[in-house]
Amino acid sequence: MNTLSRRGFLAASAAAIGAAHMPRLAFAQTVAPISLIAATRTLDINGRAATVFGLAGPGGQGLVLEPGQKFRVDLTNDLDVGTIIHWHGQIPPNAQDGVPDMPMPLLAAGETRSYDFEARPGTHWMHSHVPTQEMQLLAAPLIVRSQEDILADRQEVVMFLHDFSFRAPEEVLAEISGGHVGDGAGPSAQPEQGAPMGGVGAMQGMNHGAMGGMPMGNMSGMGGMMGGMAMDLNDYDWDAYLANDRTLSDPEVVQVERGGRIRLRVINAAAATVFWIETGGAEARLVAVDGHAVQPVPGTRFGLAMGQRLDIEIDLPNESGSWPVLALREGARERTGLILASRGAEVRRLDAMAESEAPAFDTDFAQEARLIALDALPDRPVDRSHVLMLGGSMQPYVWTINGAIWGQHQPIIARSGKRVVLSFHNMSMMAHPMHLHGHVFQVVGLNGRRVAGALRDTVHVPPMSMVDVALDAGEAARWMLHCHHMPHLAIGMMTEFAVTASA
């Protein structure tokens, strides 16, 4: 099929951007700000109604910006509780970053707040920075298209992943943590001044020095061994695993062209679930992570931790058919996904349980070590290095950075414009996806071996492993640095990257 007819198909297809709830803004610049509304919505999850939160743009959940379009957004809080939204993967001025009281307070019910900054291209997302609200699905895709995307002969599809419980998030956190989380962690509670993720006051009298404790809990999903020690892969069994708000009992079916090329933008918005993405019989290659291009990596299975994104190019066979793209829960049998199908093709029902458990994700850095940035950081001397020890255990359920939770932390100091290396040493038996606000970093070391790795904003640090990242410190301000596992975050596994002005 020639380029013109293929593009004609893409223009005519209702799935040209992927999920139906992903709007395409048909203009390069907007005069008026885009309206984005935090509100409740109702989903049908395996035949049961669920009231959740969401972020509604002009065409549904999420936003798609065209090349050169600024992020000019009026965010309105239509919830009956205070909230605040973080633009994950973007680098706004610090005052617009979306962390409670750093420096802006939560948006009160009914309040509108304006945002205006240069948008960074790539696959990104946006979510509440109150853990219980993110667990209630207050999150959505944020796609910023490049000129290459406009010119490319390919169809764009978004797969937005969640884990979900019918129970209140406060109950889920209380069960996971043995009752240690709750005071102030709920979405109706205003965080304490200086406690930007929801309250951690319930943690104040606990032993916060646990480093590298062996897991003693009897939670589900404790499969996997590492050097003879058991890894803690999953600390909660969720009621459902969602792709674009749907389960495999009623998956989204995206109409595609025979022999077409797909750019699949996968976003892991789950609270506490690592996923493997399987493309099955379709030839695929990983071309970007966290919105940044990498040298293409061929394969049919790629993993991503919470907060991370993958861009996968898929070349479909030149024949009629359907091609499931599945998201497998790490260390378990549960799965979700969507289906790519040509017009008129048979679409078979898929079981939400795989025949066997998916393995642990990247404990040996097999995937991360293959990623090479196409636009690496320039070489320059390192001005300051910091070691961040990641610790904790299942019982007591405490997760720490340098032996401390938020409120007892010592900030990580840097000067604006200076090259900094952060070394994450995970001394626990649970992996931690570490996310830094306001910066892009490059993975430069894996277990002591130097690499010219991917550019990222969220890096997965497996149990008993080390990851080094390099960055150039940005705006002089307080930037959050934390684990993107929501129960860990709610406990207080966060610190701040405090950037001061250069002398």
Image (cartoon, rainbow, N blue to C red):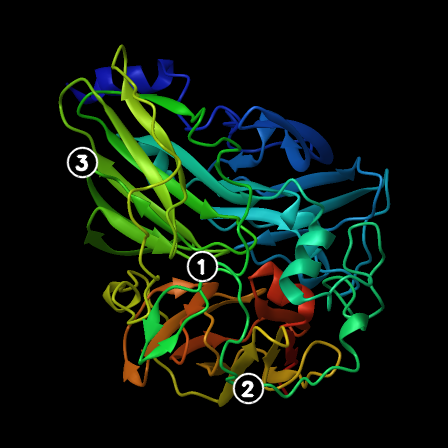
Looking at the figure, which quarter contains the C terminus? bottom right
Q: Which residue is mark 3?
A: 281
x then y, percent, for residue 107 = 82, 48
Whether residue 150 sits left or right of residue 67 in the image: it is left
- Residues at marks 1 and 2 touching, judged by CB atoms closer than 8 Å: no
* Amino acid at circle 2: Met
Whether residue 135 sits left or right of residue 22 in the image: it is right
Within 10 Å of disc 1 (Cα), the crowding (few <14, some 14-19, many 20+) is some
- In 3D space, how far apart are the residues under numbered discs 1 and 3 (Cα atoms)? 28 Å
Question: Dividing the picture into quarters, in which one does residue 345 lie?
Answer: top left
Looking at the image, which residue is at 40% across and 22% down? 15
Whether residue 49 sits left or right of residue 432 in the image: it is right
Looking at the image, which residue is at 49% across and 23% down? 20
**Secondary structure state at the residue bearing disc 3:** loop
Judge whether residue 431 can be spotted in this image: yes
Q: Which residue is mark 2?
A: 211
Q: Nearer the viewer, mark 1 or mark 2?
A: 1
- In 3D space, how far apart are the residues under numbered discs 3 and 2 (Cα atoms)? 43 Å
Tell which of 305 and 207 is nearer to you: 207
Looking at the image, which residue is at 28% across and 60% down? 374
How many numbered dots are placed on residues in this image? Answer: 3
* Amino acid at circle 3: Gly
Q: Which residue is mark 1?
A: 221
